[in-house]
Image (cartoon, rainbow, N blue to C red):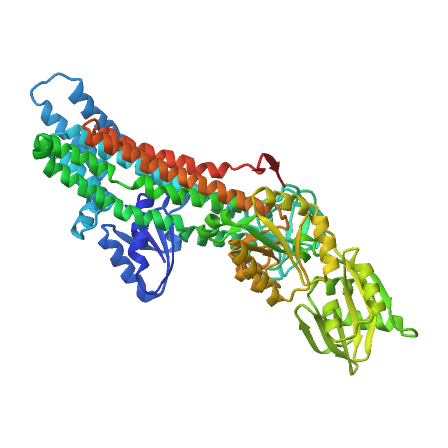
Amino acid sequence: MLIRISAMDCATEEAEIRQALSGLDGIHGLRFLLAERVLAIDAEAAALSSALAAIRRLGFSPEPISPDHRPSAAQTRAERQRERIRLGSSLALAITAELLHLVIPVFPGRELLEIGIAIAAIALAGLSVFRKGLAALRQGRLNINALMSVAVMGAFLIGRWPEAAMVMALYSVAEAIEARAVDRARQAITSLMAMAPDEAEILQQDHRWRRVAASAAVIGDLVRVSPGERLPLDGTVHSGESTIDQAPITGESLPVDKSRGDEVFAGTINQSGELQIRVTAPASLSTLARIIQAVEEAQASRAPIQRFVDRFAARYTPAVFAVALAVALLAPPLLGFTPLQAIYKALVLLVIACPCALVIATPVTVVSGLATAARRGIVIKGGLYLEEARKIKVLALDKTGTITLGKPKLVAFLFLQEGGDAAGLQQLASSLAERSDHPVSRAVAAGLDGERLTVEAFEALPGRGVRGVIAGRPLMLANHRWVEELGLCSSALEATMEAHERLGRSISLLADDNGVLAMIAVADTVRPNSAAAMEALRALGVIPVMLTGDNAATAAAIAAQAGILRVKSNLLPHEKLEAVSDLQARYGTTSMAGDGINDAPALAQADIGFAMGAAGTHIAMEAADVVIMNDDLMRVPETIALSQRTFRILRQNIALALGIKALVLILTLAGNATMWMAVFADMGTSLIVIANGLRLLRMPVAVRLEGQICSS
């Protein structure tokens, strides 16, 4: 359901609405679109009326709208233009009132003219503020609108008419700037949706190509994409060859060659040749759409520091209000102020009590960090993980497909029984291997030609291998560990396997109930950037540890090529989980990087799980806390460096927000601050923390790590 809230102006009011709705049953999710002043609620039908009532109690006027009546881009621009004219007029009138008071000599009727101009300025800028402020005061809540309403009314009543008008005008202008800044950060990622064309050229039943809405395409449709066009849908290449710029999805800086059978993604750019693509997912479930959904859900979540700031602001505002009340009542008898002087200082304190800069300091920064990561092909599924990644002490890595390319090739097939049928053994091995989705089994099946046989009672045993029955004969395709457990290893076989394992090869053994029939060796290649990624991790103070189900010799050989010093081998899936638990107990915050499927238990146990190479993989998108859309291991240290930078900016913003307000508070109590100074401090601080947070959107591709530049 979409709800238009015309008076929802800033992130502070968003937080207020979120808090009011958080305790209602039946509400599953909230998505705020401040630029459009629209709230999207995912809720049960029975909860919607309660949600509307709760929003009304806050002083807003919610209006349910249908998706078809959602404000268009043109309507949003027109409304912004009207808002700029209204606020500009208010500010001009406030300046006029101030100049009239300060510069123009006294003349009959000047006071009434000042009052009239001030009232007009306040009416243009602050009617919605007064409405929301009075609603809050009736409910005993001291929110920002209540504070500004009391401060402006108080200033007006003690004869500070121009100052009251200026405070309201400046406050409203600052709120508008804040709202635009928050939306700029949020739309940095949602703007990617515009990269997927609205139309697609689809082959019709009459064998003619016709452009239709991309949303009308169904799985199996054939789409034609000309050079220079963006792909409208996910699919596989049916015919043609080209290079594709996949940066919107994976963050890869170089185009990727694509030919028949290769996977392609909506929003990417076809560069050189015409392609015909077989659609594999509707537009609403494209990889690009799922990235945006994941980031939007992450933006809706609250990082620990955001929750802390919200709790602090909830106590800070009443505390300063109490100080202001004490100044108004006690300053005359204790400090010798006149009642009007005391009231004026109390009003200055009320302006200082506004928590705008403090509340906005975290969401703008966190959202900017999430958007920057998404642009680099890193989907961080919550502010929690963006904040916590800086604490990572250990990164556990799976070997196959994470450290290596995950595309092993068959390099040796040795027959271990004399007089055996060599072609028959290869056929048995390939028939078993074809039924498995493990990279080693896929390499065996791809490397052996011939007709496949029917496999009955097929079973995959994680960490050991596969087994089945072919033509009534029980067979297994086992790893070194399983063969040892079955007692089928001989000293000669051990020596043969050791020679291959020292070369970094993975061994599979074809065996039946009588013994081992053949030894199969496959070799994988270490990713070109694995060693650089390990170096970057160590520069960040993170210890890389390899966890693999492969044998010790192969694991050691691969680890040496990748620059990994700590290795745990021969691990079953549950033993990987136990290894992660041990690392957590020994070092603290531990992350795990894997494929998101076979490593699901260890990924779930880790404090932060990284799923690698997840573009187009629904399971990986769900399994991990951070999804790396390509296979670039450098994205992991980039994530940690981004987390460190985000937290530094968060601390800077909070320190600025509190420090400037503390300074103005001291100046007020010392008698040296005015309402002008207070509102400029509040507005200026808000703009400073916004600009500081938005710096993350301009984070360079290269990440500086301990004095060196690492890029990918």
Q: Residue 604's x, y, as percent? A: 53, 62
Quadrant that contains the N terminus: bottom left
The answer to whether 149 is drawn above or below residue 590 in the figure is above
Q: Residue 450's x, y, as percent? A: 83, 68
Can residue 238 be seen in the rendering of this structure? yes
Instruction: Name the residue at 76% across, 75% down.
Output: 487
The residue furthest bottom is 472
Q: Nearer the viewer, residue 107 or 200?
A: 107
Is residue 405 toward the left or the right of residue 169 in the image? right
The residue furthest top is 105
Q: Residue 277's x, y, as percent? A: 65, 54
The answer to whether 451 is drawn above or below residue 345 in the figure is below
Q: Residue 198's x, y, as percent? A: 53, 50
Instruction: Name the residue at 22% across, 28% down.
Output: 673
The residue furthest front is 586
Is residue 198 toward the left or the right of residue 363 in the image? right
Quadrant that contains the C terminus: top right
